Image (cartoon, rainbow, N blue to C red):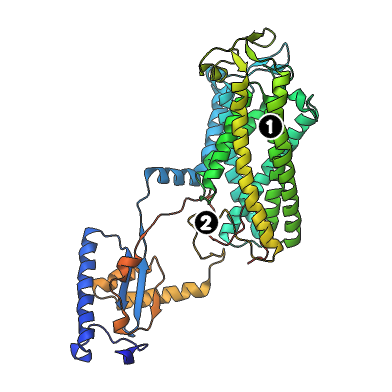
Amino acid sequence: MGDLEGTNVPPLDDTPDLFDSAKAAAQKQHRLHEHQLQHQHQKNTNLTGPFYMQRASGNVVLVRRLKRREDSTWTHLASWFVENQVGLSVNLITLMVLAHYLIPRARKYTENFFRLSYYNPATDRYASGFDDAYLITFFIVLFTGLRAGTMEYVLAPFAKLQGITKRKDLTRFSEQAWLLIYYLVFWPLGMYIYRNSPFFLNLRELWTDWPIREIDGLMKLYILAQWAFWLQQIIVINLEERRKDHWQMFCHHIITTALISSCYCYYQTRVGSFVLVIMDVVDLFLPVAKCLKYCGYKTLCDIAFGLFMVSWFAARHVVYLMVCWSIYRHSAEVVRYGCYTGPAGALVGPLDAPTGWTYLLEPYFDSAGRVCWNDTVKWAFLTPLLLLQGITVIWFTMIMRVAVQVLRGQGAEDSRSDDEADDDDEEDVPDADADENDAAAAADIDASAGSFFEKAAAAAAAAAAPIERDVGVEAIDFHSWERRSGFRRQAATSSVSLPGHSDRKELLGRIGCDKTLD
């Protein structure tokens, strides 16, 4: 038996006298396994699992294909949405514009999608109400189309010009560059509003004259656009490949969206806009660092990463906590506790707060109805803000861990890598030699296919490249297919359909810079 190790195996259908009893038993087991495969094929025409066959040269060829779990209806719907999100966005907006200008009777319904609602010409300011949901919906569709179109037709080609060839890096670069574009627009806008506001560098002014029922148009546009952006981000993280901190990101987006909606409905837009400015400044440096990393600018990446860490700590762990302290201390000193009713200019209050909890929801449904501020409402705002601080502390710990690895000269591993990542990297340019070898192997298998077993292997070779090696007959394990076969679910695609999307474990990804580039 040992003398046959490493030699070419003669065809399994040769005369039995060439083998000893052990080999004959293996051949019998092989035929039994072949019969089982044929029976399984009759039940299910999908060829799954590994197949063993013997080519004319005597070499044993292992052809294996993993089983794929049937995708759910939601998965098919999500894939369809990802592939068509640019077209869907353009068609929806075009349809709405045509209906607005070509159907006069529809304008009273469509105009709210394109303008700020509840304008008061007497004060030249805007109130809030349910009709604001139309503009938020328009922004969600607009951001979806802009994001996908910009990533696929502008940023991905630009990344290729910078020498980025790996498909996963193309996708990641496009995602981060899109975020950079967004924050380059909205952080200066928020900073402009803050700089020209009465609460600039004065935390106590965040609470004066509350409740402010009407705000200027620029503030309203800023808040509604940010609200729509974070709602759209919730959609994005559930469509793209999930990372290890998916649920942290999901909770972050839910809390952020809830806080924006609450500050808008409770007329705390001053606090809300200031918090957004604090949080957004960090997101200017992080995408820059990651884009520089993907482009190979190591020194610039390290500089941007250092600025990112400084801005993160200063904005999210110093100024942010100052705002939390202002909510706890200044709101109790400046705001007169109680409830207020009536529109702007005709406020009545403060009134005693009713018993129970339902009054906390009234501002969400009646813009001129009762709105209250007391310890209960204060802690209803402060608690999610502190939870958000807890999430950012966890992330900052991960960031510091990466920074320590870089300073020690170690390779930085992505703390937020994909959950369903493959070990291999696919290049943007296919390997011609590999393609030729795979084609030759597949042709060889197809030429030698005569029995059902060989035909099955030939069909499976179209989906997976065969692994060819010389082994002894006794080394063949006909039960290994039971251990090796398994289910593999297709990973969710990113929100932009770059062709050949692949995964990789060793990416710094969303946090920091790699010490070296592959």
- Which quarter of the rendering shows the N terminus? bottom left
Q: Which residue is at the front of the view, 275 or 454?
A: 275
- The residue drawn where x is 73% and y is 13% is 123
Q: Is residue 419 left or right of residue 63?
A: right
**Where is residue 119 drawn, in percent x and y?**
66, 16
Label 1 vs 2, first from the N-terminus: 1
- The residue drawn where x is 67% and y is 54% is 400
**Where is residue 296 drawn, in percent x and y?**
69, 62
Q: 10 Å neighbourhood of mark 1: few (<14), some, or many (≥20)?
A: some
Q: Amino acid at mark 1?
A: Cys
* Position of 193 relative to 103 (above/below): below
- The residue drawn where x is 70% and y is 31% is 325
**Where is residue 204 drawn, in percent x and y?**
76, 24
Q: How far separated are the C-alphas under marks 1 and 2?
A: 45 Å
- The residue drawn where x is 56% and y is 15% is 366
Q: Nearer the viewer, mark 1 or mark 2?
A: 1
* Position of 87 relative to 26 (above/below): above
The residue wearing badge 2 is 499
The residue wearing badge 1 is 324
Dividing the picture into quadrants, the one containing residue 203 is: top right
Q: Is residue 154 visible?
A: no
* Position of 465 relative to 72 (above/below): below
Dividing the picture into quadrants, the one containing residue 147 is: top right
**Where is residue 280 drawn, in percent x and y?**
69, 40
Q: Amino acid at mark 2?
A: Pro
Q: 10 Å neighbourhood of mark 2: few (<14), some, or many (≥20)?
A: few
Q: Is disc 2 placed on a helix, strand or loop?
A: loop
Q: Is disc 1 placed on a helix, strand or loop?
A: helix
